Image (cartoon, grey):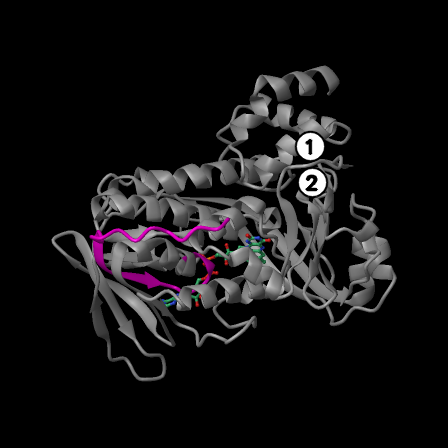
């Protein structure tokens, strides 16, 4: 049963300001509110009342998977969140291990059971459900149509933000806070603000993947893809392209095709359909051939995955904490960004429960632990694709060979498939794939 977070009698922070009111910012607000007198979310966009696109999140029109580990983390912060998604039309069916068809590493993974239902829903509805819950929290205020343009610092400590109202001229105001959470996304605005003040900034790493997305919607019928909610085609070095169909509210599929480096999914209907037939996955081609596209495919370019190593900055100022894409923006085809943000928000709340000092001393490492898990998986796979450029993977070469073997075994071994799904859904740490009960199956059957 869902439980409400305990509200301690003495809160460890007065005012927490969150810059950016997308998934990471809203979940950060939920995480901080039990431990702060007030939480103020400052969002540049005017926010819609329900699920709808807006300028500050241009990615929402493309397929988004919400991983089980991310949904559980969001549920912990906002009890009732999953019920809200279902009420808003999210589609659920069966255990996640049997709810989709995953062609990963060149083959179809076995059906299995991981102990969590599969749930499919659009990115707009996820954000709308989070926003509605957060708006109901008594000490949280969401202010929209306000642009955070810098930080305020005193004696090396961040003590607030500078803001202005778009369209109201260059005049700025200041807002003071005990903690400023930077949830402004992948562009690194917060790092620029730290630099402007002469404060230390993190090292940044980029893996150039040159990813191109193309997305459309089609009607969804109950017996499509064997009644499943998801069909995924992961890339392999010889086929550096992929795609996904995810069931959406309103009996629709969202279908996104993607390619690395020089592979560009076409934006014309015939080319889009032809591209889908060239995937490892055998579902998407026939599915797209069977009915009209509801709109012409729309493109999106994602040049690189990027990570900022805040945990390495010894003298990161007190009063500043980044979250979400501001820390790490992953190859989106792995579907991790929202879920990593949710797990980071849990880490932020846990730190703030111990006081502002712990946000400075413990949270960067806590967030890095979450990011490490996803980053290692994503970059380890991406760096095997010809033409992808980046620093060598942190894991030794035998790990990549072991994972390839594990994926082969997972095509016919439900126990190994379940272990793999639990890790890729951020429910378990990747080291669980090396435990003896899994390793012997991989080594004996690979
Ligand atoms: C094409 C694509 C597909 C993706 N697919 C998936 C997926 O399948 N699964 C998944 O989990 N994730 C996916 N992601 C990532 C996911 O969208 C993000 O991780 C998620 O939105 C959380 O990001 P965020 O809140 O940190 O930043 P964003 O969503 O980028 O939000 C930043 C917010 O800050 C606001 N803002 C910016 N500057 C200011 C300012 N100066 N003042 C005030 N407000 C400001 C913006 O308006 C925006 O609302 C995908 C991303 C892309 C690009």
- Residue 315 location (% of width, % of height): 22, 42
Report whether 123 appears left or right of 298.
left
Front residue of 177 and 382: 177
Mark 2 packing: few (<14 Cα in 10 Å), some, or many (20+)? many
Report whether 104 appears left or right of 173.
right
Which picture quadrant has residue 24?
A: bottom left
The numbered mark, 2 or 1, whose residue comes first in the sequence reads 2
Q: Nearer the viewer, mark 2 or mark 1?
A: 2
Q: Is the residue marked 2 within 8 Å of ligand 1, measured from its CB? A: no
> Is 264 rendered above or below residue 143?
above
> Is 30 rendered above or below residue 1?
below
Numbered circle sitting on residue 154: none
Marks 2 and 1 in Cβ contact (< 8 Å): yes
Residue located farthest toward the bottom when viewing the structure as drawn: 168
Q: Which residue is mark 1?
A: 417
Span highlighted in magenta in the image: 1-24
Residue 9 on the magenta span: yes
Residue 311 on the magenta span: no
Residue positioned 62% across, 39% down in the render: 115
Secondary structure, mark 1, is helix
- Residue 179 location (% of width, % of height): 25, 56
Secondary structure, mark 2, is helix
If the image is split into quadrants, where does the C terminus sit?
top right
Q: Is residue 227 visible?
A: yes
Q: Which residue is mark 2?
A: 97
Mark-to-mark CA distance, 2 and 1: 8 Å
- Residue 41 location (% of width, % of height): 35, 66
Q: Is residue 122 visible?
A: no
> Is 311 rendered above or below residue 324?
above
Secondary structure character of the magenta stretch overall = loop
Residue located farthest toward the front when viewing the structure as drawn: 1
Front residue of 187 and 100: 100
């Amino acid at each position: 049963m869902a439980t409400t977070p305990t509200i301690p009698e003495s809160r460890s922070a007065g005012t927490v300001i969150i810059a950016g009111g997308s998934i990471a910012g809203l979940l950060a607000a939920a995480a901080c509110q039990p431990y702060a007198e007030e939480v103020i979310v400052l969002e540049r966009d005017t926010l819609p009342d329900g699920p709808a696109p807006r300028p500050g999140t241009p990615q929402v029109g493309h397929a988004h998977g919400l991983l089980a580990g991310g949904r559980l983390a969001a549920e912990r912060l906002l009890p009732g969140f999953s019920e809200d998604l279902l009420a808003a039309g999210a589609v659920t069916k069966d255990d996640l291990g049997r709810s989709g068809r995953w062609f990963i590493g060149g083959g179809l993974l076995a059906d299995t059971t991981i102990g969590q239902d599969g749930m499919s829903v659009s990115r707009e509805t996820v954000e709308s459900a989070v926003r509605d819950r957060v708006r109901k929290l008594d000490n949280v205020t969401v202010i929209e149509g306000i642009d955070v343009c810098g930080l305020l610092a005193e004696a090396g400590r961040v003590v607030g933000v500078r803001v202005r109202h778009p369209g109201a001229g260059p005049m700025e105001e200041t807002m003071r806070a005990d903690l400023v959470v930077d949830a402004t996304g992948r562009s690194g605005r917060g790092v620029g603000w730290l630099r402007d003040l002469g404060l230390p900034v993190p090292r940044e790493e980029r893996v150039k993947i040159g990813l191109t997305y193309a997305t459309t919607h089609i009607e969804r019928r109950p017996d499509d893809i064997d009644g499943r909610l998801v069909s995924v085609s992961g890339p392999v070095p010889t086929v550096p392209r992929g795609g996904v169909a995810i069931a959406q509210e309103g009996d629709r599929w969202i279908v996104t095709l993607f390619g690395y480096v020089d592979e560009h999914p076409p934006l014309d209907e015939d080319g889009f359909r032809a591209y889908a037939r060239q995937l490892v996955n055998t579902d998407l081609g026939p599915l797209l051939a069977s009915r009209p596209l509801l709109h012409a495919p729309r493109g999106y370019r994602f040049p690189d995955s990027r990570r900022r190593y805040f945990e390495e900055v010894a003298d990161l100022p007190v009063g500043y904490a980044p979250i979400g894409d501001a820390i790490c923006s992953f190859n989106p085809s792995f579907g991790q960004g929202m879920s990593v943000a949710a797990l980071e928000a849990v880490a932020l709340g846990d730190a703030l429960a111990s006081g502002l000092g712990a946000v400075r001393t413990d949270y960067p490492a806590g967030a890095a632990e979450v990011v490490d898990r996803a980053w290692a998986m994503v970059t380890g796979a991406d760096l095997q694709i010809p033409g992808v450029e980046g620093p060598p993977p942190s894991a030794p070469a035998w790990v990549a060979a072991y994972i390839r073997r594990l994926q082969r075994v997972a095509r016919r071994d439900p126990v190994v498939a379940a272990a793999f799904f639990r890790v890729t859904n951020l429910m378990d740490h990747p080291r669980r794939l090396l435990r003896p009960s899994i390793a012997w199956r991989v080594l004996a059957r690979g």
